[in-house]
Amino acid sequence: MKLLVSLVILMSASYAQAYNVVGDKIHFQSDSTWVSAYYNKTICHDGETYAAEVNKCLKYRNVRGDQECVEWGKGFIYQPITSTRVICVEERGDSGICQEWQTVEYHQSPTMVVEFYAERGERLIKKETITVPTCN
């Protein structure tokens, strides 16, 4: 009986695995970071701008010409829902070197279809439509 109970617990723990989540990220360009709209419980928008509370550097110091973080803490970051980004529109042969760049509109919808894959492998577990809530 103990073996059966142990086996059920082990199977339940392995079933409650972590997922590889695809399609849930909002790119905060000026902070060079991505925030999960599924896992981050602070992300919200006001119709024009996303806001999220993250761990970030609050204070820097200069060290030999480079900036080094000396104080980490919680802080808000912001990203317009619609902004611009620069993309490569022409590469040189197979080298991967970009010949021509172009500025394009970059829209990140508050509603997204998120795919959940098994942690090991590429098996799709489920799809879910989520919407980033509006800020209070």
Image (cartoon, rainbow, N blue to C red):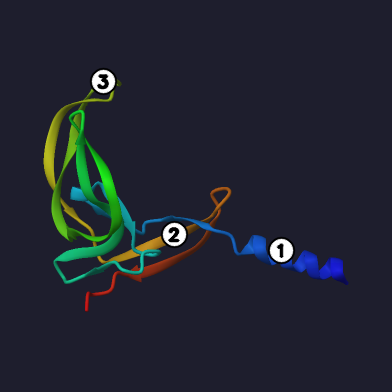
Rendering quarter of residue 131: bottom left
Q: Nearer the viewer, mark 2 or mark 1?
A: 1
Task: Categorize mark 3 by other alpha carbons within 10 Å: few (<14), some (14-19), many (20+).
Answer: few
Q: Nearer the viewer, mark 3 or mark 1?
A: 1
Q: Is residue 1 left or right of residue 97?
A: right
Horizontal arrangement in the rendering, residue 70 relative to residue 124 (left or right): left
> The C terminus is located in which quarter?
bottom left
Q: Amino acid at mark 1?
A: Met
Give the x, y percent position of residue 89.
18, 34
As drawn, which residue projects farthest toward the left? 103
Q: Disc 3 vs disc 2: Cβ atoms closer than 8 Å? A: no
Tell me residue 37's x, y (percent).
Answer: 34, 63
Disc 3 versus disc 2: nearer the observer: 2
Compared with 51, 71 (above or below) is: above
Q: Which mark is residue 115?
A: 2
Q: Position of residue 66 (x, y in %)?
A: 21, 33
Residue on which disc 3 sits = 93
Judged from the image, the secondary structure of the residue bearing numbered disc 3 is loop
Name the residue beneath numbered marker 1: 11
Q: Amino acid at mark 2?
A: Glu
